[in-house]
Image: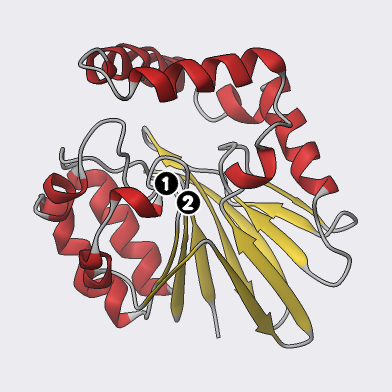
Amino acid sequence: MKILVFSDTHLTDRFDQGKFRFLQKIINFSDQVIINGDFWDSWFTNFDDFVNSEWRKLFPILLKKRAIYIYGNHDPARKRDSRASLFSVEQEEFYILTLADQTYRIEHGSNILKGNRPKSIEIYSWFLNRIDKTILGRPVYQFLHFFEYLGYKLIGAPLMTGSKVARHLNEVMKQAGREENFLICGETHCAEIDENARYANSGCILYGTASYLLLDENGVALRRENF
């Protein structure tokens, strides 16, 4: 039994054939799928446009793998509707999985980080959440997205894995782990496994770089690839 856990794909109504092929490959390779938040991005599109985009070609593949969909901060429950059942058999804020002798608590991580981010990040998040309700929201997000895209193209994955803020946020989430459960999060885009802390982060699949987790009877493994 091989379970794929991925997060932070931030899909919009714009289709990317290369990213589609990569997601198709890793989904088909697995026996079951858990989408750990930020599957689609409400900052750049709405749910209706997303489910009617070419990304719908992924939906039958995900259903075949009985995908579990966990909400993130970019795709919260309030911004979707019953059509989430087109690509997932269950939708949750978190999911408890027992595999062999190990119990995993899988959640995106944004709820854990509320109030625990550095003050600069809290102010930044407050600003983005406020502007989301105005006509300026979409242009500002597109502007920020462009600079993030440049960063990934010029620097690649180390933009996140080498980020002091991302590493700090992972440490905050490790402290929230429960002794009886192995905690798996996303959110920070910073992939990691820390067996001592009983914590793993699935990272992200963005701009040609990918990280994801594979769970089986032997534990959890981290995979990194370019696409």
Residue 112 disc label? none
> In which image quadrant can residue 87 be found?
bottom left
Q: Nearer the viewer, mark 1 or mark 2?
A: 1
Residue plotted at (20% across, 74% down)? 60
Residue 155 visible (yes or no) = no
Which quadrant is home to the N terminus?
bottom right
Residue 199 at x, y = what percent? 77, 55
Q: Badge 1, how many Cα within 10 Å: few under 14, some, many 20+?
A: many
Earlier in the chain: of badge 1 and badge 2, it is 2
Circle 1 sits in a helix, a strand or a loop, which is it?
A: loop
User: In the picture shown, does residue 27 fall above or below 16?
Assistant: below
Residue corresponding to mark 2: 7
- Which amino acid type is marked by label 1? Asp
Q: CA distance from mark 1 to mark 2?
A: 6 Å
Question: In which quadrant will I find the C terminus?
Answer: top left
Q: Is residue 56 above or below residue 150?
A: below
The answer to whether residue 30 shows anywhere in this view is yes
| Residue type marked 2 | Ser
- Residue drawn at (34%, 73%) of the image: 28
x, y percent for residue 202: 58, 51
